[in-house]
Image (cartoon, rainbow, N blue to C red):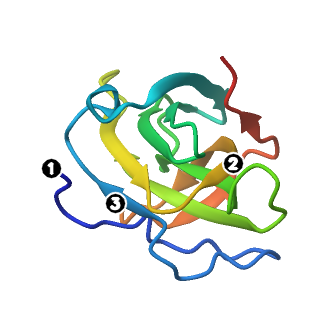
């Protein structure tokens, strides 16, 4: 059963509009139970942040993600993840940018994981990148490169 509706809500100020649509909802149930197939992951380490986003998809371009972030440097920043994707599937050129609600402010090696976020609409071209954030989860800056989910 799909539980609490929770968008990847913090809009990131950028040249491209983040929009305020409710693109994602949270559910603790595994994507495999809903017929999703594992697609792959995107990961990187930059500026003392390790990020990983795993994706599962359906045949009609709906996605589910699990995110893990770890703050690996004592630099005064917390660690989080920003994702970018095309709204409306692979053929769309309409990009959305969201902060994934995972935040790690410790350097204890444990990191923070959150699963599962399901897209409310077809999406495509999922990318992620490591970001520094404040303790409230607001992004301060991100690595320059985007990392595409790959099998």
User: In this view of the protein, which residue sits in the foreground, 117 or 36?
Assistant: 36
Image location of residue 15, percent across then percent down: 82, 76
Separation (CA) of disc 1 from disc 2: 24 Å
Q: Earlier in the sequence, mark 1 or mark 2?
A: 1
Name the residue at the front extreme. 59
Classify mark 2: residues with Cα within 10 Å, few (<14), some (14-19) or many (20+): many
- Badge 3 marks a residue whose secondary structure is strand
Nearest to viewer (mark 1 / mark 3): 1
Image location of residue 39, percent across then percent down: 58, 24
Residue 87 in the image: above or below residue 82:
below
Based on the displayed image, in which of its 4 quarters is residue 64 positioned? top left
Q: Does residue 11 appear left or right of residue 66 in this picture?
A: right
Q: Does residue 38 appear left or right of residue 12 in this picture?
A: left
Separation (CA) of disc 3 from disc 2: 17 Å
In percent of the image, x 20 and y 37: which residue is there? 29
Based on the displayed image, in which of its 4 quarters is residue 16 positioned? bottom right
Name the residue at the top extreme. 151
The image's mark for residue 62 is: none
- Badge 2 marks a residue whose secondary structure is strand
Q: Which residue is mark 2?
A: 124
Q: Earlier in the sequence, mark 3 or mark 2?
A: 3
- Badge 1 marks a residue whose secondary structure is loop
Q: Is residue 81 visible?
A: yes
Q: Which residue is mark 1?
A: 1
Image location of residue 32, percent across then percent down: 33, 26
Q: Which residue is mark 3?
A: 25
Task: Pick the quarter of the image with the C terminus.
Answer: top right
Separation (CA) of disc 1 from disc 3: 12 Å
């Amino acid at each position: 059963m799909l539980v609490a509706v929770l968008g990847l809500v913090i809009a990131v100020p950028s040249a491209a509009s983040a929009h305020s649509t409710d693109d994602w909802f949270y559910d603790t149930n595994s994507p495999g139970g809903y017929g999703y197939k594992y697609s792959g992951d995107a990961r990187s380490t930059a500026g003392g942040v390790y990020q990983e986003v795993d994706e599962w998809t359906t045949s009609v371009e709906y996605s589910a993600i699990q995110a893990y972030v770890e703050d690996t440097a004592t630099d005064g920043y917390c660690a989080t993840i920003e994702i970018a994707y095309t709204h409306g599937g692979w053929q769309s050129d309409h990009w959305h940018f969201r902060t994934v609600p995972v935040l790690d402010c410790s350097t204890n090696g444990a990191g923070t994981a959150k699963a599962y976020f399901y897209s409310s609409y077809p999406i495509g071209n999922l990318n992620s990148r490591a970001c520094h954030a404040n303790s409230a989860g607001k992004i301060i800056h991100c690595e320059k490169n985007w990392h595409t989910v790959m099998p």
